[in-house]
Amino acid sequence: MNFAFSDEEMGFLKDFQDHLAQERQRSDAAVIFAPHRETDSWLVDGPERRAFMKRLAQAGYIGMSWARDYGGRERPGIYDYLLNEELSSQGAPIIGKGVGCIGKTIIAHGSDRLKREFLPQILAADIEFALGYSEPGAGSDLASLRLRAERKGENWVLNGQKMWTTSAHFADWYWVAARTDAEAPKHKGISVFLVPMDHPGLTVTEVKTMGDHRTNQVFFDNVDVPGDYLVGEENAGWRYVCEALDYERFALYTVGPLLLKFQSLVELLKLARRGGAPLAADPVIRARVAELACETETATMLQRRVIARAIKGDVPTVEAAMYKLYSTRLGRSIANYALDCLGPLGLLRSGAPHAPFDGRWEMSDRATVVDTIGGGSSEIQKNIVARRGLGLLVGA
Ligand SMILES: Cc1cc2nc3c(=O)[nH]c(=O)nc-3n(C[C@H](O)[C@H](O)[C@H](O)COP(=O)(O)OP(=O)(O)OC[C@H]3O[C@@H](n4cnc5c(N)ncnc54)[C@H](O)[C@@H]3O)c2cc1C
């Protein structure tokens, strides 16, 4: 059994770390690299972070695993993973939706027209996408979505509502799953569309999560979409959505932020004092943090299992569910324990006088709750492990 990366992979990583070291010399580095940002470290949400992405594109780091015919380098997916792991470990925005979920789906199923229009813009990091799947009545049970798309001549007209759309307030394009056949079984009547976010029929309103993460609800009022912007085949959308999620499991499941969080806890214990003695000297605290160290190592290994299966070309559904369940719960435990150690002052929010670490752990405690919901809640991950991993079928 070999958990190590190859010399070539390590060489790539070293080159990329050098690239990031150069980036860190820039005067706007503090806006780009934010290692203690919580849930939104992957968002491209400001001009500096967008410009950072464009520089990544110019250096050839975007679309590495795409076929050469589409401007890629045909490198194995492990390179996308290594890239994202390093980016997220340093708090920089990661590559994801555009190059992975959307780009790869367009390559596999999109028309030549969509390929010509979108692939070059994705490779150049010129456009940002929002993903419109969830609705008020369709989250865990996504196939129940109801946003209606009706054919009117050459166009489609979309009416209804999406919920929890991250990035809708700054994205350029909306990747939307809509119901195109209300009579078909629910998985068979869904299609995917591309809609410009500045369409006058779209209204975006803010929803703030308890972790301060901005997400949005989006209302569709007679949003007409030219037929060219239907992705792939009509009513085949469920397959495209599932394939896109498979990619997400591979490249977006980074462990770096969790390791950073644990390291920050260790630093806190070295710095904080109680009754004149460092917290790190307390045997009860040392025992608990040793347990958390073991759990952090376990999370790292669970994540490696996701990668190992994905590299073989398998879909790591059960491994990814285990990793998401375990790592997000551990994130909660670490943040929670930091608050225990800080005592009452730890509950002060950022900006309040005397807030330790400027309220970072208070914020982390709230944000880590959100991590257990977005991308599929913990209960759904448990269902996947029980059903698909252990064969414990409901009603069997
Ligand atoms: C920060 C954040 C960002 C997000 N970004 C996006 C985005 O960009 N685009 C997008 O489309 N969506 C996005 N989502 C939505 C996310 O995918 C859903 O919130 C998630 O899938 C849960 O769906 P729901 O909120 O409708 O909860 P529900 O599905 O209604 O679940 C409510 C509760 O019931 C439990 N539950 C549901 N079904 C079962 C079951 N079968 N067995 C056991 N328990 C169950 C759930 O675990 C949960 O505790 C985001 C969510 C968050 C929090």
Image (cartoon, rainbow, N blue to C red):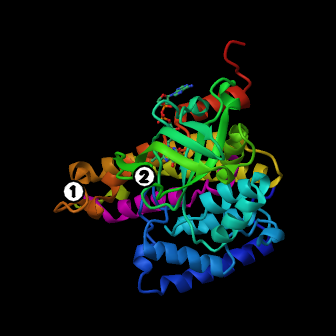
Dot 1 surroundings within 10 Å: few (below 14), some, or many (20 or more)?
few
The quarter holding residue 76 reads bottom right
Instruction: Give the position of the N terminus as an image quadrant.
Output: bottom right
Using the numbered discs, state the Cα–Cα distance from disc 2 to disc 1 in whole angstroms.
Answer: 17 Å
Q: Which residue is mark 1?
A: 275
Q: What amino acid is labelled 2 in the image?
A: Arg
Q: Which range of residues does the magenta coloring cover?
A: 246-275
**355 on left or right of 54:** left
**342 on left or right of 107:** left
State the mark number for residue 345. none
Image spot of residue 22 (x, y percent): 55, 86
State the mark number for residue 286. 2
Between 337 and 120, the one nearer to me in the picture: 120
Mark closest to the chain's N terminus, 2 or 1: 1
Magenta stretch holds residue 274: yes
Dot 2 surroundings within 10 Å: few (below 14), some, or many (20 or more)?
some
The residue sitting at the left extreme is: 353
Between 111 and 103, the one nearer to me in the picture: 111
Image spot of residue 371 (x, y percent): 47, 46
